[in-house]
Image (cartoon, helix red, strand yellow):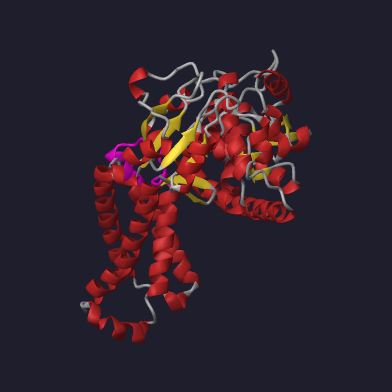
Amino acid sequence: MRVRILGQYIPASLAALAVIEALVCFLAVYVAVCIRFQVGFSGLPELVGEFGPLWPRGVAFSATVVTCLLAFGLYNSRQRTQLSGTLARLLLALLVSSCIFAAVFYVFPSRHLFRGVAGLAVVLSVCGVLTSRLIFARVADEEIFKRRVLVYGAGYAAAALTGMRRTADGNAFALVGFVPSLGEERAVPGERVLEYDGDLCALCERLAVTEVVVAMDDRRRGFPIPELLECRLAGVDVTELLTFLERETGRVRIDLLNPSWMIFGQGFKRDPLRIFSSRAIDVLASLAVLVVALPAMILTFFAIKIEDGWQAPALYRQARVGLGGQVFRVLKFRSMRQDAELNGAQWAQQADPRVTRIGAIIRRLRIDELPQVFNVLRGHMSFVGPRPERPEFVAQLAERIPYYVQRHCVKPGITGWAQLCYPYGSSETDALEKLQYDLYYIKNNSLLFDLAILIQTAEVVLFSKGAR
């Protein structure tokens, strides 16, 4: 089962884990106070009278830790790190949260938490979060968190569900089986097809099904309106295949997409309030990045000059396609040789020989992207959105990939949902995969979703995910 939080469909197990860990961190503050001042919980009212209420400090500490855990990818269902990697991310997240926590209480000294208490709270949080993670690793795959899904259809559309082998795409539901529709050529394994006597509701009740996914190849023939209506009224959710896949995978399947789904479905909103909030976060985030990253930008500027000579440009401008198909010049630190494209535009390659020594470093750390904040301030780009592509590639991809031009209905971004969910794209196949995530973002974009993407981008930058 998945719940929708900040524009994302998150497995209920991970949402429950986040709530538990937030509570653990909140209680860690109270336990730390008791240990530090050697009092029991019954003695807390006296301390509250002397130092002020503890709950605002507990809430601030808990919110900071959970936000940092999110930023370090510890609530990412696609995370594949082992226990050692999880522990390293956890310790880094708590280190960062401790620094943020200290800064917050420096700004608000009346809510200060003693260093001894803060240190104990961090240690207790590490122990509590590790314990919750170990327990979670044992029970996360249990059926208690999973929806039992029955698929109505056994043809080529339904076969899309048999390919969901990844844990990230299939850990929120249990696929009970497939019910074939009339006149449909079967494309799913025979052992997954269920015996069906025509009473769909009774079958759902017998198999404890909680959701029916309609995945017929041709709905014009034998669409089971009475049966699906009976299931719906009996409390069983009925979902269309594309909507189900969108929810479970965080992308829109191009091969199953039809225009009516986009026209009549929810999402794709661009109201004035959304446009204003997007611009506000663009300006604030860009100014914040400039303040924090200015020393790194200056060092990068001189490093490029030293490597390639003082006459060589440290920055370069390249044509990209933006909102409404308009071409603008994106600004980046130069990471390749000056003659990198003498033979025309080329896709970036793994271990690209055109990349300079300094260029390899700044690409890995994403520093080459920092000058794009000036594009954001000028209004050519947003901080969050689909990555802008070059006109040469756009013309080629628009001819071969359906709905590719629809990604230009919003401003391109420095970071985006596709960058979080898919590695660096350097081919037509990659462009198709990333488009599916871009369409998901365009359909579900909101201020909170943008904030969630910005927080999770920290994982991409810190761990060099997808750098090339």
Q: Point out the image quarter for the N terminus.
A: top left
Q: Position of residue 48 (x, y in %)?
A: 34, 82
Q: Please state which of residues 128 and 153 is positioned toward the viewer in this rendering.
A: 153
* Residue located 60% across and 30% down the image: 435
Q: How many numbered dots are placed on residues in this image?
A: 0
Q: Position of residue 6 (x, y in %)?
A: 53, 51
* Residue located 34% across and 52% down the image: 17
Q: Is residue 137 left or right of residue 290?
A: left
> Do we see residue 458 in this rendering?
no
Is residue 341 depicted above or below 10 in this figure?
Answer: above
Furthest toward the top, the residue is: 343
Q: Please state which of residues 137 and 230 is positioned toward the viewer in this rendering.
A: 230
User: Is residue 82 on the magenta stretch?
Assistant: yes
* Residue located 40% across and 57% down the image: 65
Q: Position of residue 375 (x, y in %)?
A: 71, 42
User: Is residue 325 on the magenta stretch?
Assistant: no
Magenta span main SS: loop
Q: Please state which of residues 404 and 326 is positioned toward the viewer in this rendering.
A: 404
Q: Is residue 273 left or right of residue 113?
A: right
Q: Is residue 81 left or right of residue 460?
A: left
Q: Position of residue 336 (x, y in %)?
A: 61, 25
- The stretch in magenta equals 72-89
Tell me the quarter of the picture where residue 411 sits: top right
* Residue located 32% across and 39% down the image: 206
> Do we see residue 253 in this rendering?
yes
